[in-house]
Amino acid sequence: MMKRCVKIIPLLAIFFVFSAKADVVLKDASEILGKWELNAEALKLDGEKKHVKSEWEFKSNGILQSTATDSLGRTKEMVVPVKFFVEDGVIKKQAAPGREKYESCSVIEKDNSKMVLKCTSLFFFLTKK
């Protein structure tokens, strides 16, 4: 009996480590609708974060409107609308406006006020407005 417990404990530890990093599965787009402030982006979840000043608005009509402010004051504001939808628990968004190529963004963490997305090449750190 004791040998069986000794073998099971490491397996349980591995299970909990992997389940702690599990993605959030979205039921539908209603879970992300609204305005989110994009605060930072990073190549790795626990890597160095680059500060970003942008707003993402997930609209009910399937448009993700990104509004960026030029911190140097050259162009004031730039607004970029792209299509998005939720499929199989992840966000699918256009890679660029006007193209029908989509990238998948998994929700790594989410609560009422914060969300972390892992898209094709970057992690995005957002705060609900």
Image (cartoon, rainbow, N blue to C red):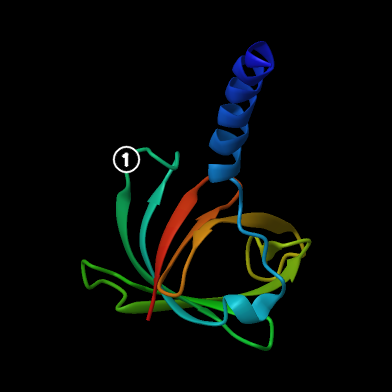
Q: Position of residue 85 (x, y in %)?
A: 72, 72
Residue 63 in view in this figure: no
Viewer-closest of 5 and 43: 5
Q: Which quadrant of the figure has residue 48?
A: top left
Relative vertical location of residue 103 with respect to residue 63 in this rendering, above or below: above
Query: What secondary structure is marked by label 1?
Result: loop
Q: Position of residue 12 (x, y in %)?
A: 61, 30
Relative vertical location of residue 107 with respect to residue 76 in this rendering, above or below: above
Q: Position of residue 66 (x, y in %)?
A: 48, 74
Residue at image location 23% in from the left, 68% down from the top: 71
Q: Which quadrant of the figure has residue 55?
A: bottom left
Question: Residue most toward the left?
Answer: 72
| Residue corresponding to mark 1 | 48
Q: Quadrant of the C terminus?
A: bottom left
Q: Position of residue 13 (x, y in %)?
A: 56, 29
Question: Residue most toward the front?
Answer: 1
Residue 97 in view in this figure: yes
Report the amino acid beneath label 1.
Glu
